[in-house]
Amino acid sequence: MQPAAFEHQIVYGLQTAFRGGRRRCSEEWSGRLNGTRSLGILALVAVVSRKKVYGVFRDWPGQPLYGSRNAAMIGLKGTLNIIDNSGALVAECVNVLKQKVNNGWGSVGDEIVVVVQRARPVSAAAAASVTAVKVRRGDVRRAVIVRTRKEVRRPDGRIVRFDDNAAVLLNNKREMLGTRIAGVVSADLRMKGWGKIASLAPKVL
């Protein structure tokens, strides 16, 4: 079914500065996609048809999105790839620890509690070993976020984003469960006290 068959409602989310703070307002317009124009301070454009959002578009690159500030951050039920050699492959976030500023959303360097959704099969030798780390599907573990899809603006003006959300598992002493990391991690880990994890990664961006 073509979206052009419906009347589109263009929802503009505006963000303006007011006396050193942030004042947010929104205006709703009815029209077609080809009839939209930039308003200069536009932060969010959502195309809605029959109360279903078809897409969200950024008008100014690097500017925060009104109404979807945490769209690509890690929250409850968020899925992450586990990129260490602990045995876990995919995990689901069930809690973000000590996060009040972002209202329960986690970013790079934040600790979270995850449930392992997919894991490598445990070999017979590892199952018989007492010291070997055995991570199975359904285990509840702590983890630290090492990269996210959400773009981050660095102090030098660069905007960095990754293709997926990823984490590494931790033990109760806040140490890595695994011994190796396979994949790129964010350089923001060093600023949040996770320099050891960054040093184990093959590449830091």
Image (cartoon, rainbow, N blue to C red):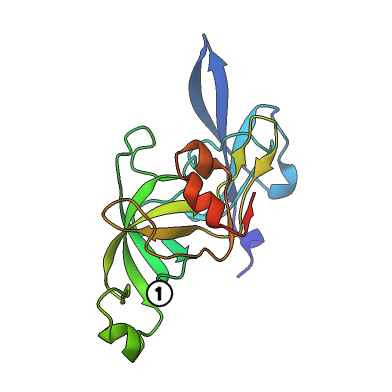
* Quarter occupied by the N terminus: bottom right
In the rendered structure, the answer to whether residue 121 lies left or right of residue 188 reads left
SS class, disc 1: loop
For residue 138, which quarter of the picture? bottom left
Q: Nearer the viewer, residue 196 or 21?
A: 196
The structure residue drawn at horizontal position 65% and vertical position 45%, both measured from the top left corner, is 160
Image point 54% across, 41% down: which residue? Answer: 188
Q: Residue at x 70, y 27 (%)?
A: 40
Quarter of the rendering containing residue 143? bottom left
Is the residue 28 above or below the residue 143 in the image?
A: above
73 and 137: which one is in front?
A: 137
Where 25 falls versus 93 (above or below)?
Answer: above
In this picture, is 63 found above or below 33? above
Q: Position of residue 87 (x, y in %)?
A: 40, 74
Estimate the x, y position of residue 11 in percent, counting from the top left: 56, 40
Residue most extreme to the top: 19
Residue 148 appearing in the image: no
In the figure, 97 relative to 18: above or below? below
Q: Position of residue 76 (x, y in %)?
A: 34, 54
Q: Residue at x 31, y 77 (%)?
A: 136
Horizontal placement of 30 versus 172: left or right? right
Number of marks present in the image shown: 1
Q: Amino acid at mark 1?
A: Gly
- Whether residue 24 appears in this view of the structure is yes
x and y percent of residue 30 in the render?
A: 60, 42
Residue that sits furthest to the bottom in the current view: 124
**Would you say 62 lies left or right of 178 here?**
right
Residue holding disc 1: 87
